[in-house]
Image (tube, rainbow, N blue to C red):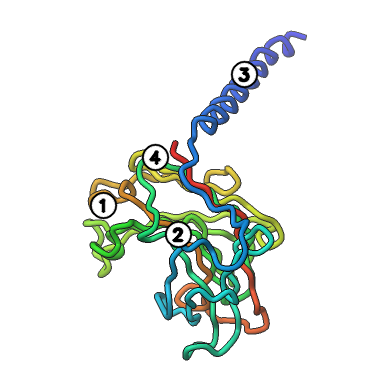
């Protein structure tokens, strides 16, 4: 009986703390103001007032050709954005896909939270991503613009999603003067269920989440390029095929669809 009397106050304290934390999280979310969103409830191509395109062979020795305004590769359908990767001959490539972004259409400043609900494609060679870069990319280039990978998946590591931050840093001796910080999480139903991939920025600190579970929190060091993590950001959604990280490609997996239910950006 004495033991029960000693434990009970501790349990009550833990319950109180948990309830208080839950209330604080709820209050913080209540204070968030929706700045921008796309629910993808239309038909055909994505909203041209919100999204532009990368076209051609863009980066990382990837094997797909990113097409321009081609519904075979990107479209709104049944309340989702569909980015579809195909095995086909097109413009000298053996694969096609799509990469859309908000560059020169919408950038996001200050303390923000980005939420993207998505169901991922699968198979060796597939490389979908939800990511952001500095809107100053045309002026300073990569990696000075910084790169914030909210979600990346590569088919040769089944069930694992990655979140990574990249930045220019004066301390590194690497030729491209870039450093990175990342983490990964195993998720069993990436390809059969939608999950919410999020980024929060408060000051110079970036946090990444999967379904509300913290994956990574990191603040830009003093040796990073000016305004790293704090400047205006734009959003990218794409699926690559093969390349430096996508690796070998299994042609039997195609077609593959990257489904995005919504993108929502909040002021926090």
Instruction: Quickly name the residue at label 3.
Output: 16
In space, the residues marked 3 and 2 are separated at their CA atoms by: 47 Å
Crowdedness of circle 3 by 10 Å Cα count: few (<14), some, many (20+)?
A: few
Q: Is residue 208 visible?
A: no
Which-is-in-front pick, marks 3 and 2? Answer: 2
Asked whether 154 or 36 is in front, the reply is 36
**Position of 96 relative to 261 (above/below):** below
| Quadrant of the drawing holding the N terminus | top right
Disc 4 secondary structure class:
loop
In space, the residues marked 3 and 4 are separated at their CA atoms by: 29 Å
Crowdedness of circle 2 by 10 Å Cα count: few (<14), some, many (20+)?
A: few
**Position of 16 relative to 115 (above/below):** above
- In the picture, the disc for residue 224 is 1
Question: Residue 79's image quarter?
Answer: bottom right
Q: List x then y, in percent, for residue 137.
A: 30, 62
Q: Is residue 60 visible?
A: yes
Q: List x then y, in percent, for residue 254.
A: 65, 79
Q: List x then y, in percent, for residue 268.
A: 44, 36
In space, the residues marked 1 and 3 are separated at their CA atoms by: 41 Å
Instruction: Quickly name the residue at label 2.
Output: 49
Is the residue under label 2 in contact with that under label 3 (CB below 8 Å)?
no
Disc 2 secondary structure class:
loop
């Amino acid at each position: 009986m004495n033991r029960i009397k000693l434990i009970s106050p501790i349990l009550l304290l833990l319950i109180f703390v948990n309830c208080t934390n839950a209330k604080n999280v709820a209050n913080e979310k209540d204070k968030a103001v929706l700045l921008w969103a796309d629910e993808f409830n239309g038909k055909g191509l994505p909203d041209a007032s919100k999204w532009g395109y990368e076209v051609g062979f863009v980066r990382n020795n990837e094997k797909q050709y990113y097409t321009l305004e081609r519904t075979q590769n990107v479209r709104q359908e049944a309340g989702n954005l569909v980015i579809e990767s195909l095995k086909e001959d097109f413009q000298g490539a053996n694969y096609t896909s799509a990469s859309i972004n908000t560059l020169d259409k919408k950038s996001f400043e200050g303390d923000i939270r980005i939420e993207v609900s998505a169901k991922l494609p699968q198979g060796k060679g597939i490389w979908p991503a939800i990511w952001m870069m500095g809107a100053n990319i045309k002026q300073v280039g990569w990696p000075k613009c910084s790169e914030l990978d909210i979600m990346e998946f590569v088919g040769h590591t089944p069930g694992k999603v990655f979140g990574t931050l990249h930045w220019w840093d004066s301390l590194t001796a690497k030729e491209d003067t870039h450093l990175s910080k990342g983490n990964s999480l195993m998720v069993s139903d990436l390809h059969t269920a939608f999950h919410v991939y999020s980024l929060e920025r408060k000051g110079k600190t970036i946090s990444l989440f999967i379904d509300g579970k913290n994956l990574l929190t990191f603040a830009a060091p003093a040796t990073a390029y000016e305004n790293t993590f704090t400047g205006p950001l734009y959003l990218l959604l794409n699926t690559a095929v093969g390349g430096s990280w996508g690796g070998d490609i299994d042609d039997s997996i195609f077609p593959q669809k990257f489904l995005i239910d919504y993108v929502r950006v909040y002021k926090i």
